[in-house]
Amino acid sequence: MKNQSKNTRSDFLEINPQEFSKAGHKLIDDIISFTEDIPNKPITKAETVGVLRDALSLRPLPEEGTALPELMANTTDLLIDHSLFNGHPGFMGYITASAAPSGALADLLAATINPNCGAGILSPMATEIENQTIQWLAELIGYNSDAGGVLVSGGNMANFTGFLAGRTAKAPVDLKEKGLAGLEKPMTVYCSKGTHTWIEKAAILFGHGSEAVRWIPQNEHHQMDNEKLESAIISDIDAGFQPFMVVGTAGDVSTGKVDDLSGISKLSKKYDLWFHVDGAYGVPAAALPELNETFKGLESADSIALDPHKWLYCPLEAGGVLVKNRQDLINAFSSHPEYYNFDAGPDQPSVNFYEYGLQNSRGFRALKVWIALQQAGRSGYQTLIREDIQLSELLFDLADNHSELEAVTQSLSITTFRYLPENIPTDSELGIKYLNELNETLLNEIASDGEIFVSNAIIDGNYCLRSCIVNFRTNQQTIHDLIKIVVQKGRELHKSLCNDHGF
Ligand SMILES: *Cc1c(COP(=O)(O)O)cnc(C)c1O
């Protein structure tokens, strides 16, 4: 002990300028070549878990350290060789965006400064950047620009946050003190049949139970049927329930349809319900003036969920919730333990984001969103989103004009269609069953080929291929390729399957 200098620490994790520079510069070079090469790679190799674990060469926790340049180079290879690339132009499955590469730099910087965005005094500039990001998101979609809000990990968390704020605001008792046990009547929530599964998860996890969710049928436009919504509310009130929230969807996950938000808004006011909009996927399209009519009523929502990691092309994870009145978040989420001394601002009190949501310590996920919003600007985003929609429309038209394809729905940037060989009856039980099986097999084969990736939707009982374009690398050629691949594969499969099914 005597010989050890008081001023040294072991440097296992400390920056070593030469090593860090070597590892970092190589990583940046690798990112550039990887990104340029994405279109030439298979979207996925669909490898088995066995193959993945072999490549990872599972072994016990290493006892000794490894030099950073070697470690980073190996890790880069491992991920580039064995990942699914949602940044590939042919990736149109689910709702996962191509990620703006600027997000990688933003995350690097965010991790370097490492602000704890739970409290203003722990993250002075980062908290102000998050505030501005929230304000810009609200401006982008035409919501009031003094909206409150908070960034979260994704759409589920954003919707949960809105759900919890809404129920605290609308509960007839002080939920904070009394809990659900203090309610005389069970609380109920209303949403369209097409609503994403988060709503069921919320009802279960937050103590209402799945039966508290009233699934309202959709009309022929795949929007929530607002007449049925109103009758459900009335009959629940008569039966002794306490309706508290209506969820409108702005971009249904299957069809991209936007509910009649202004109709829902009127009903919410009439029955004093919280109006939440799940715009996790679709709400960025409200930035387009030509869609003003589609999104009418959005401005009157009490809360809105939107996912920058979807149609704002940010890398995972970035979700966000906006609320008309920020006090509603504070009412639901704030509690002040004695050991928090976060209110000692010199002039005006800063925002403490731990009071706005479920998290306590929080990372700086706002930075990549803030950077991307400035990199593209409002008009850049409008153009990219508009192009995605036009490509989706192109796909619908090509499918519609092809004798072996059926174009089913098109809205925002989601198109559903299916392979429909001639002479297969679409109204007989056998025919329906065969077509569903044919299209499901088709989807799986296309995915494992690695050139194109689409997912599925069940529309009116029919298994459809579903393409969702939130990808600034997809272009017209990709759409023509998709049609070609579906028809080619569809023909082959139909030839090999039809005899077994008696066609
Ligand atoms: C994707 C999505 C969600 C869930 O969002 P995550 O980011 O996956 O948690 C919820 N609602 C809608 C409409 C979505 O598209």
Image (cartoon, rainbow, N blue to C red):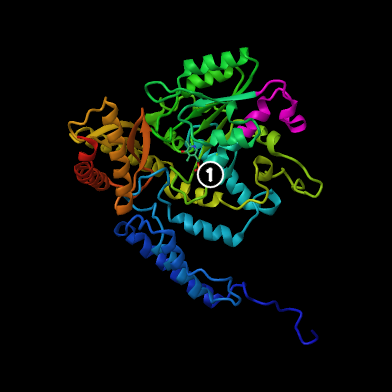
**Residue 490 shown left or right of residue 321 in the figure:** left
Residue closest to the eye, 429 or 179: 429
Q: Is 178 contained in the magenta span?
A: yes
Look at the numbered disc 1 and give the secondary structure of its residue: loop
Q: Is mark 1 within 8 Å of ligand 1?
A: yes
- Specify the quadrant that holds the C terminus: top left
* x 39%, y 64%: residue: 81
Residue closest to the eye, 29 or 191: 191
* x 43%, y 46%: residue: 96
* x 55%, y 49%: residue: 366
Q: Which residue is mark 1?
A: 154
In the rendered view, tell whether residue 233 sits above or below residue 162.
Answer: above
Residue 39 in the image: state x and y as whole percent.
31, 56
Q: Write down the quadrant of residue 190 in the picture.
A: top right
**Residue 395 shown left or right of residue 255 in the figure:** left
In the rendered view, tell whether residue 96 sits above or below residue 231.
Answer: below
> Could one spot residue 402 in this view of the protein?
no
Residue 415 in the image: state x and y as whole percent.
33, 36
* x 48%, y 31%: residue: 195
Q: Is 201 contained in the magenta span?
A: no
Magenta stretch, residue numbers: 163-186
**Residue 75 shown left or right of residue 91 in the figure:** right
Residue closest to the eye, 77 or 118: 77
In the rendered view, tell whether residue 503 sits above or below residue 215.
Answer: below
The kind of residue tagged 1 is Gly
